[in-house]
Image (cartoon, grey):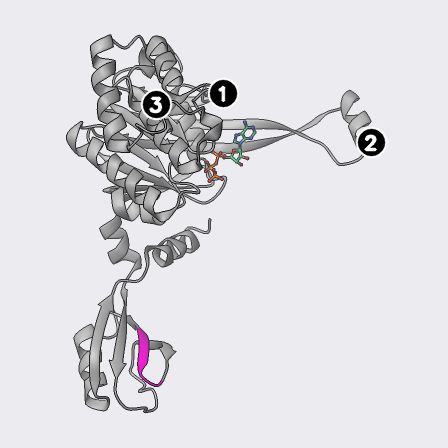
Amino acid sequence: MITVEGLCKTFKVAKRSAGFKAALRSLFRREYIAIEALRDVSFHINEGEIVGYIGPNGAGKSTTIKVMSGILVPDKGKCSILGRTPWKERIAHVTNIGVVFGQRSQLWWDVPVIDSFELLRDIYEVEKEKYRNNLDMLVETLGLSSILNNPVRQLSLGQRMRCEIAASLLHSPKILFLDEPTIGLDAVSKIAVRQFIKSINKEKKVTVILTTHDLGDIEALADRILLIGKGRILYDGSLNSLRSQFGACKTITIDFRENSPPPAIKGTEMLVWSPERATLLVDTHQAGVSRVIATLAEQLELLDVTVENPPIEEIIVQLYKEYEI
Ligand SMILES: Nc1ncnc2c1ncn2[C@@H]1O[C@H](COP(=O)(O)OP(=O)(O)OP(=O)(O)O)[C@@H](O)[C@H]1O
């Protein structure tokens, strides 16, 4: 469905020092620096996938999304989405895609939400019946009925984001690009947005490319992760294989009765030790979890044991370290 091959994009940025003199000098002699936002980016995405596109700030995520949406023209490389080159066949291309930039709005600020939706219907030339059906479904599943007549500027961030997502889907696109769709949302709104993304992927077979710094979004949604750093794709695989590659650790939390000194067990690191509760980090390459629990049980009267995977944040930090990004 999506093929990206050898994409390169360099931005030329004027270099200017602070101060009046420097401003005056730059009028006559301007210096530029080149920022390589994308360096030979390639990947394929199949129909029905949810791909988490992650990487640190300035890695090139939004630039890739802009190229795939047809907003930016790359310097080099190919991109084919449903057989079209986005920046060459923009009008035909946008009928197949929906885009949500969490930090920007595609809704008109001063008019009621429903008027923005009607305008989008005209822009995308959506048939009346299809529009009505889509609108009814989106209003119901995203809970928009009480805010449809409010101007966008009066909406809370969570309400606006739900309207943005609805706006991006009114024309039944096959692909949805989401650039930080849960930024700034409270826990309830985040979960609602995640559930909705999951449901349109499952029920309407919409392919989703999701850019986010919220690794909870990735854990909840993405089957596959693409990691970009300094403009290059560094990892392409599932979250599970990432876990087994970088997450060869488990945490064991124990509740115990007596107040005794912490036992030293090879292959473990004591993260927390308090009179009745302790948390250990186990390197599973060095020590088996069951062996560690058995050793703890020999030395302490255990009341409860919890074994967990390390948080996804830790794995991603390790990944960023490994690739020096
Ligand atoms: N219009 C532009 N003009 C100049 N430089 C740009 C422009 N857009 C992006 N860049 C630069 O290209 C690089 C990649 O930016 P991009 O916005 O793609 O990163 P990102 O991965 O989306 O980052 P973030 O997570 O912070 O949103 C950055 O160094 C950025 O400063």
Q: Residue 213: image x %, image y %?
A: 41, 45
Q: Identify the residue at image location x=37%, y=53%.
A: 316
Q: Residue 291: image x %, image y %?
A: 18, 79
Q: Secondary structure at mark 2?
A: helix
**Is residue 318 positioned above or below 190 on the image?**
below
Mark-to-mark CA distance, 1 and 2? 38 Å
Of the image marks 2 and 3, the number of the one nearer the N terminus: 2
Which label sits in the foreground, 2 or 3?
3
Q: Which mark is residue 302?
A: none
Answer few, some or many: residues within 10 Å of disc 1's Cα (few below 14, many 20 plus, some between 14 and 19). few
Residue to which mark 2 is pinned: 20
**Is residue 116 positioned above or below 213 on the image?**
above
Residue to which mark 3 is pinned: 167
Q: Amino acid at mark 3?
A: Ala
Name the side, left or right, on which 13 lies relative to 17.
left
Q: Secondary structure at mark 3?
A: helix
Q: Amino acid at mark 1?
A: Asp
Q: Which residues are magenta?
A: 275-280
Q: Nearer the viewer, residue 231 or 289?
A: 289
Q: Which mark is residue 110?
A: 1
Q: Identify the residue at image location x=32%, y=91%.
A: 260
**Is residue 159 positioned above or below 321 on the image?**
above
